[in-house]
Every structure is written in structure tokens, then in C-alpha cells.
Amino acid sequence: MFCPKCGSMLLPKKINGKNVMACCSCSFAGKEEDNAKIVEKAQEKKELDIVDKDDDDSLPLTDAECPKCGNKEARYWMIQTRAGDEPETKFLKCTACKYIWRDYS
Ligand SMILES: [Zn+2]
Ligand SMILES: [Zn+2]
């Protein structure tokens, strides 16, 4: 997360007893709602990156049933959704209808 004013890194700070993201080099401090929006935007972007993946010819094939069309073959890739402490998420893309879904198992 970066400061919308100066582009420096935002760091979590306690202001008036509330945890907010504040800029380390200027006076910018996000309100809680603003921070929620920043996080939402970041996540939205991530989802788009996933859907935009179109170099699927190089992805490995696997046996998986498409929840949309019932096709039994999909290409898959792994994405580290958060830094470090969470396991990778497996994404599958149907070879027939191009539907993309997550495999949580
Ligand atoms: Zn700043
Ligand atoms: Zn399908």
C-alpha cells in the first residue's frame, strides 16, 4: 500500500486509538474507511490479473471437472495470494469454455 499523496509506503499506526495506515514521509493518514477501499482496490486488481491470464498454452493440464460446462480437463497454475504465511491457491481454467475457478482442496 502506498501513499496517494507522495507515493511513499504506508505503515500501520495507531491514531486516536484506531489503527490506520499512515504515510512514513508526509502527513497523510488514511481513515479506516479509506483504508478498506485501498485494500478492496488492491484485491480487485489481483482478481483482474488472474482473469487476464491468457498465456494458458504453457500451463500444465490436469483432470478436473469444470463446474460450468462439465468438461473434464483444465489447465492450472498456482498463485501466492498473501505474503508468506498462507498456502498457494490453485487456479483452474477449463480448456473448453475458459471458465476460471479456484481449487481450495
Ligand atoms: Zn505521503
Ligand atoms: Zn468449462
Image (cartoon, rainbow, N blue to C red):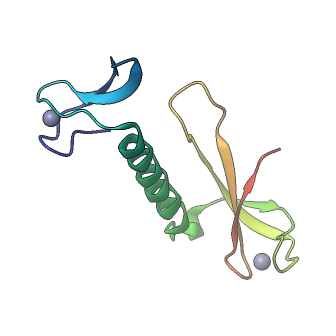
Judging depth in this view, the residue of 53 and 85 nearest the camera is 85
- In this view, the residue farthest toward the front is 16
Report the label total. 0
Q: Name the residue at 66% across, 44% down.
A: 89
Q: Is residue 89 above or below residue 71?
A: above
Residue 82 lies, with reference to residue 54, above or below; the image says above
Which residue sits at x=22%, y=39%?
A: 3
| Residue 85 pos. (x, y %) | 59, 24
Residue shown at the point (43%, 58%) measured from the top left: 45
Horizontal and vertical percent for residue 100? 67, 67
Q: Position of residue 91 (x, y in %)?
A: 67, 55
User: Which quadrant of the figure has residue 34?
Assistant: top left
| Along the viewing direction, whichever of 103 and 32 lies nearer the viewer | 32
In the displayed structure image, the side of residue 56 where residue 32 appears, left or right: left
Q: Quadrant of the C terminus?
A: top right
Q: Quadrant of ligand 2?
A: bottom right
Indicate the quadrant containing the N terminus: top left, top right, bottom left or bottom right: top left
Q: Is residue 3 left or right of residue 91?
A: left
Q: Which of the 4 image quadrants contains residue 71?
A: bottom right
Q: Is residue 47 left or right of residue 14?
A: right
Rendered position, 76 above or below 96: above
Q: Nearer the viewer, residue 23 or 80?
A: 23
**Residue appearing at x 41%, y 44% in the figure:** 33
Residue 58: give x, y in percent of width and height.
57, 63
